[in-house]
Image (cartoon, grey):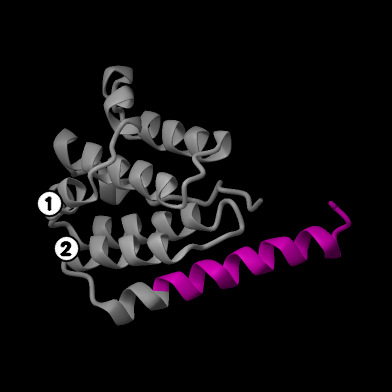
């Protein structure tokens, strides 16, 4: 299990409307369920992100019950802020690696979300590779500094 606590650039998300922020977090929720395993670490990550965005608890139940990928794709199209869209892709890549098992469904969903927001496949792959490299470095640091 990887550590999901990376530094999200919340400032780029602050300018989003509540509807856009909810779409952002719904994409997380759907991604977490894509591999058929929605564990407590993934739920905690989503709760943490929602709280950081100022999304009320009343919307959290709605977010956790999301199961229509097509509807989410339509909702994320409303995120027109490119920096926020890039942040969403980064955070989705982190979440997809939470259980150390990146499934084809997760990869496909991240790609579809990115394309819906106007992010090129090359850029999505670049972000994914950066996340993987960073996660490897963090795991190596635990070994080097004997934190295992």
Residue 108 located within the stretch drawn in magenta = no
Q: Residue visible at 40% across and 37% down?
A: 49
Q: How many other residues sit within 10 Å of disc 1, few (<14), some (14-19) or many (≥20)?
A: some
Q: Are marks 1 and 2 in contact (CB under 8 Å)?
A: yes
Position of 91 with respect to 18 (left or right) is right
The one nearer the camera, 52 or 43, is: 43
Label 1 residue SS: helix
Position of 50 with respect to 97 (left or right) is left
Residue 47 location, x and y as percent? 43, 31
Considering every residue shown, the one lying at the far front of the view is: 36
Q: How many other residues sit within 10 Å of disc 2, few (<14), some (14-19) or many (≥20)?
A: many
Q: Residue tagged by mark 1?
A: 74
Position of 137 with respect to 111 (left or right) is right
Q: Residue visible at 40% across and 51% down?
A: 34
Considering every residue shown, the one lying at the far bottom of the view is: 122
Q: Residue visible at 66% across and 68% down?
A: 136
Tag count in the figure? 2
Looking at the rendering, the stretch of residues picked out in magenta corresponds to: 127-148
- As drawn, 132 above or below 70: below
Label 2 residue SS: helix
- As drawn, 102 above or below 3: below
Residue 107 location, x and y as percent? 40, 66
Q: Residue tagged by mark 2?
A: 116
The one nearer the camera, 98 or 148, is: 98
Position of 24 with respect to 98 (left or right) is left
Q: Give the main secondary structure of the magenta stretch.
A: helix
* Cα–Cα span, label 1 and label 2: 8 Å
Q: Quadrant of residue 142?
A: bottom right
Residue 89 location, x and y as percent? 34, 60
Q: Earlier in the sequence, mark 1 or mark 2?
A: 1
Q: Quadrant of residue 53?
A: top left
Q: Residue visible at 85% across and 59% down?
A: 145
């Amino acid at each position: 299990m990887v550590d999901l606590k990376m530094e999200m650039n919340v400032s780029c998300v602050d300018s989003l409307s509540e509807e856009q922020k909810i779409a952002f977090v719904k994409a997380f929720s759907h991604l977490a369920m894509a591999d058929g395993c929605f564990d407590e670490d993934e739920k905690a990550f989503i709760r943490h992100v929602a709280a950081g965005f100022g999304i009320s608890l009343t919307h959290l139940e709605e977010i956790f019950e999301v199961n229509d990928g097509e509807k989410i794709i339509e909702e994320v199209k409303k995120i027109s802020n490119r920096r926020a869209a890039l942040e969403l892709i980064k955070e989705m890549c982190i979440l997809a690696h939470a259980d150390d098992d990146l499934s084809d469904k997760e990869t496909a969903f991240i790609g579809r979300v990115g394309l819906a927001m106007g992010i090129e496949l090359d850029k999505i792959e670049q972000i994914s590779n950066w996340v993987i490299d960073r996660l490897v470095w963090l795991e190596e640091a635990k070994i080097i500094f004997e934190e295992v």
